Amino acid sequence: MQKASRLKRELQMLSTEPPPGITCWQTEERVDDLRAQIVGGTGTPYEGGLFLLEIKVPERYPFEPPKMRFLTPVYHPNIDNSGRICHDALKLPPKGAWKPSLNISTVLTSIQLLMAEPNPDDPLMADISSEFKYNKPLFTEKARKWTQEHAVQKNMGVVEANKENTPDQKASSRKREAFGTQQEAEESAKKTCV
Amino acid sequence: MEGSDSLEQNGSDQPESQRRRQLDRLDREEAFYQFVNNLSDEDYRLMRDNNLLGTPGEVTEDELFSRLQQIKDGPEQQNNSTSAPSTESGEDPVEPPENSEDPANGDSLLDWLNTVRRTGNTTRTGHRGNQSWRAVSQTNPNSGDFRFSLEISVNRNLAEQQAAAEGEQESPQESPQESPEGQEVVASAEPQVASAEPQVASAEPQVASAEPQVASAEPEVENAEPEVENAEPELENAEPQVPMETEVVEEPVVEELAVTVEPEPEPELEEVVSQEILAEPPSSPAALPVQPPLSPSPRRGQRRARSRSPEPRRTRARTARSRSPLNLDQLDGLPNPRHAHSSQGLNSATFAPPVSQVEGSSRTRQHVLSRQSIADSDVQPSRASAETVPEAQNVGSQEGEAAGGEGAAAGRRPPTIMLDLQVRRVRPGEYRQRDSIASRTRSRSQNSNNTFLYESERGGFRRTFSRSERAGVRTYVSTIRIPIRRISDAGLGEATSMALQSMIRQIMTGFGELGYLMDSDSDSSDSNRGANTPADLAEALNNPDAATPAAAPVADVDEPPLATGVRARTAEADVDEGLATAPPPPGGRARPRPPISLEEPSSLPFLRLAHFFLLNDDDEDQPQGLTKEQIDNLSMRNFGETDALKTCSVCITEYAEGNKLRKLPCSHEYHVHCIDRWLSENSTCPICRRAVLISANRESVV
């Protein structure tokens, strides 16, 4: 119900007191299509990167969780090629943990945490997950490389974010090729994380 | 998102207008809250329950107000329109099943189940893997009766079955291609198994007696049934190769599971669920009497006149019968008056009976036992072969019974599983009579040859399983009783699907067990009897007659002329039996029987069915909300200035003077309209996630 008024308030909060490392804004003319940027945490392979997310606020918000996905490619066990995030706060109970007292800000924060601490036991990307578990150095290196490649921007700035679509597509297609061979594994993996 | 899309369509170009629209929307939302806050409790509830509140921001206050007026003015009208005239025929008043027929895939079966109560009568079919299903539901809005039948055929004869069964409405989608293999498999397998034995084909001889009661008691039930029945797959080509001499009889296994809710004295809503699952092997090649395919016509139960008529309700004529030449001859010769009928009834042989009798008179606990003890009569001595027709007369009325006729030896491989679930809501004062009926009665004669009783109580569900074997027909009865309280706890009273689901889950679990028992039974019996089985069988067949010679005639007398469909069926069953048994020498011992081949995985469709449900259930894991009553039971108050906690965490808005707040058992408070909406789909506190339901339940139950 309370979608519009709630969103309004949330956006206010996000602009007045944003959580550290997170910015969130609304795309030009729509309240329910938001963008957010998460700064890669220090000490993580994502350090130095800026990760853009797309946030769609469903009509039934806050009774349904917002839909979030990364627009920036992220090498992460719980984030798939298309940027989808396996995170319980993004799902309704009983499978998920969304509740109306959460909000966009808190969910973004928890995604930030998830980036710092992947959950390989509930993987969306099986291969990355096993890599994370069994060959962490390799994982770290790849993740760092991806961060350099996709998430570090030469010209920083919020405005740049809008242009991201183009490079982003290239990036993700590249990514897809890279994972082409493991497609099947992914499929099964996805099922575990739904 | 949908909403946003629509907003966006014109909005992207004109941010200005977009903005204005948003502002308007905000205003309307404010107005909405204002409006809601000003409503009296009663009005609020009224509007909420009728879904008149809509989404804040979309409806203006004026509109809301006019809606409120409307609903207040014309509540009666509304009610009238929604409730169809209740007639005896439960389903008639409601829309025809075809309406919502939807050829969707099987995966959404449960989904559909969930909506079924809302949608009234529906029929759906689909298939998944090697199973195809067809589900029919009927709802009688007046009485709250709900009936759901599901047929699942596994792996074979899909095409035929489909054709026969669904001829009229159903879409042919059911993958004709699958059938061929299935059949072949069957065909090949059977000859060996079945070969020597004279088993009784008819699964339910037992049917007959119960009826009279049923008839009187509840018209509704019966009507409903017809649909269920059609499930039988006909094997047309199935076993051409079977040599004439050997009679191959497949034993039809009919299993019924009756789940009955025990009516408790308390004047609550009671719901009765009876479920039957019939598994039927494809038509038995040998057994059948002539009948050319019966008129395929009126099989759809609903439309058709009620079940009683002997006419072929099930169209699925079994072609198989026509196949066996042996029988034909015999049939012709039959002295039995019944045979005439039988011809009509035949088709239904195995299955239908259970259905029709769904509702019996009140059942008592002991039913199973009593049933067995009752001696029955046998039919037609005339039949040389000593077939016995089990006529059950348990006046006492038992609860559900399952009859699984099973040729002792042959592998049972039921290609079709029928599940018939009936939920009846009994309201306190009214429907008392029904109430009694709520239980199902099914009687069948058993000469209590071998009976086996198993009872267990688990998780509040009392399960009784009994097996008896007589005349080569094994009967399995599995009854699951669910105390009413559980059901109301589960919220069935509220017509929720979750309750149904969990019930089904339980039931299916029961079935898994049943299947297991059956297997083990057969094993044990095999081991016990070893090679003699055939002899036993034969004896068994003969025994009844011998033992109770007197009985037979009586039985005949008892049977009224085939007044009812059931009757017809019985007759048919007889015929089948007769045919099957005829060949064996009267002495019984005559034929050595090949070692019994245990049923292989074939008996597992139950389990598969269970999985089917369980899997779906998993997929379907949806949040379960509270019922309106449960929500209304939560305390409510008006916000006062002095309160410490000032913000509703659902809408992130400070409470204003006069706001209505609802307090959950965990002490967290929210705007009434905020929390109600959340709780209608979820059962936990939005802040602490404590289950609201538990305490709510406790209150309501105690």
Image (cartoon, coloured by chain):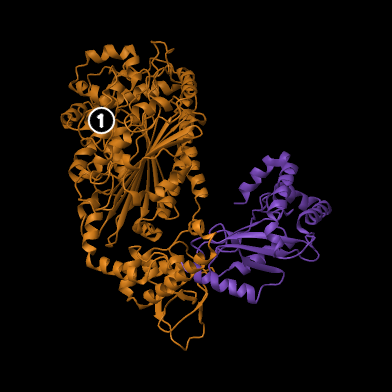
Q: Residue furthest bottom?
A: B642
Query: Residue B81's image quarter?
Result: bottom left
Count how many numbered circles sit on residues in the image.
Answer: 1
Query: Dot 1: what SS?
Result: loop
Q: Nearer the viewer, residue B100 or B116?
A: B100
Looking at the picture, which amino acid does disc 1 mark?
A: Pro
Q: In the visual, does B106 lie left or right of A42?
A: left
Quarter that holds the C terminus of chain B = bottom left
Q: Is residue B17 left or right of residue B68?
A: right
Whether residue B664 is visible here, answered yes or no, is yes
> In this view of the protein, can residue B446 be seen by the observer?
no
Q: Residues within 10 Å of mark 1 (few under 14, many from 20)?
A: some
Q: Is residue B566 above or below residue B76?
A: above
Q: State the purple chain.
A: A
Displayed quadrant of residue A10 = bottom right
Front-most of B537 and B25? Answer: B25
Which residue is pictured at 17% across the width and 21% down the height? B337
- Look at mark 1 in the image and give the residue it sits on: B298
Q: Image height check: is A194 above or below A36?
A: above
Quarter residue B693 falls in:
bottom left
Query: Which chain is tinted orange?
Result: B
Q: Chain of mark 1?
A: B
- B526 and B164: which is toward the camera: B164
